Image (cartoon, rainbow, N blue to C red):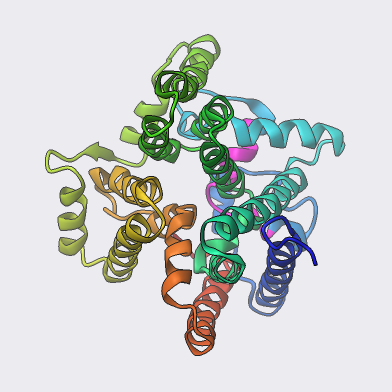
Amino acid sequence: MPDDTRSASPALRIFLWSRAAIWVVAIIAVVFFERADPGAEWDSPRLHELGTVIDVWARWDSNWFLKIAGEGYSWPSSTPAFLPLYPFLVAGLGFVLFGHPLLAGVVVSLVAGSAAFVLLYRLTAVKLGAATAQHTVLYLALAPTSLFFGAVYSESLFLLLAVGTFLFAEKGSFWKAGGLAGLALLTRSAGVALLPALIVFAWRSPDRRRALAGVAIAPILFALYPLLLALWIGRPLAFLDAQRVVWERHLSPAGPIGGLVAAVQDRQALDLAVTCIVIALGVVAWRRIGAPYGLYVLVSLALPLAVYSTKAPLLSMQRFVVVAFPAFMALATIMHSRKATVVTAAILSAALAVYVVRWSLWYWVA
């Protein structure tokens, strides 16, 4: 009998059929309800050269990743806000694919997403059992913003690196965990949330000093990005300037509470509800799975809440939380009966379908 903790088939099966269903919904939406492309102002000449089937996965911020892949960083622009690992991988694969970075971006996202699901299944199976692992990857696959795991966005790559970080930390391989956390930091700023979790793992290690030294690799790797910006555009902190100028993100004196209060005042009911649910799941993860897991979820939320956008306090929050994978592990420990699974999957699927249609028709999603 195969070892369920090592098997890749349940996670791969769920990832592949869910992506196939999302593609079908997206194509139907575009074919029957296509509207004018409001992304023209983003000056993205490559978005349509491969046809509707592929370019449906390049919306909104995808343009910045493709621009970096094709032209590199510039200033003044929004490009420094997007960290380099994902667009550089897209650029490399795009060269192999004869100058098609859009197709390369979709391939990178799908490959990284499938690998992330496999690793998440294995991690959860070891911690909570195979049944909970299957529910975890199912709920993650059906999450409304899981559509980004196949889009030209960095969510898939970041999820892969985050789950890999936890896997190596659980095994006590802190040099590898620190290295992956550093790569996660070079993929998304949310990688900062991995550091407190890693420090907890390292503090509990029998060889604490060596473990903490391994964790220190992460910020050292991230330091390559300011160095890159300094050499490329002469502004090592341009990634902070872009967030402040373009997205109007500012640090709240009240910390995460400031973002929550601003969201209430701005009447962001849906985003606020999702945020509160994920906070609750973070607490559940802390209690049922372990402090590093809960800490990662809660810090992942605390960062965008403390440094929120004055345009919309919870801007992109639903997309941010989809990579907070312990929240889905926690959800699977709660919704584990057959009836609860069916109801939860049905609700998530309906919301996902709506989000895919909106995304396909160029309405803002997350």
Q: Position of residue 163 (x, y in %)?
A: 55, 46
Q: Is 40 displayed left or right of 214 in the figure? A: right
Residue 365 visible, this angle? no
- Front in this rendered view, residue 266 or 123: 123
Q: Residue furthest bottom?
A: 339
Foreground of the two, 184 or 306: 184
Residue 213 located left or right of residue 187: left
Numbered label tally: 0
Placement of 66 over or under 342, stated as above or below? above
Task: Locate residue 11 relative to residue 245 in the image: left or right.
Answer: right
Q: Position of residue 36 (x, y in %)?
A: 59, 65
Quadrant in which the N terminus is drawn: bottom right
Location of residue 4 by image quarter: bottom right
**65 magenta-colored:** yes
What residue is at 35 percent from the left and 52 percent from the top?
A: 294
**Residue 193 visible in the snapshot:** yes
Q: Quadrant of the C terminus?
A: bottom left
Magenta residues, start to end: 56-68
In the displayed structure, 299 sits above or below 58; it is above
Question: Residue 344: horizontal and vertical position, in percent?
Answer: 48, 81
Q: Quadrant of residue 63?
A: top right
The residue lying furthest to the left in this view is: 254
Residue beneath the point at 75% across and 57% down: 54
Q: Is residue 260 magenta?
A: no
Please name whichever residue, 175 or 208, is drawn nearer the observer in this view of the structure: 208
> Residue 26 falls in which quadrant of the image?
bottom right
On the image, the x and y values in percent for residue 150 come to 66, 57
Depth check, front residue: 179 or 63: 179
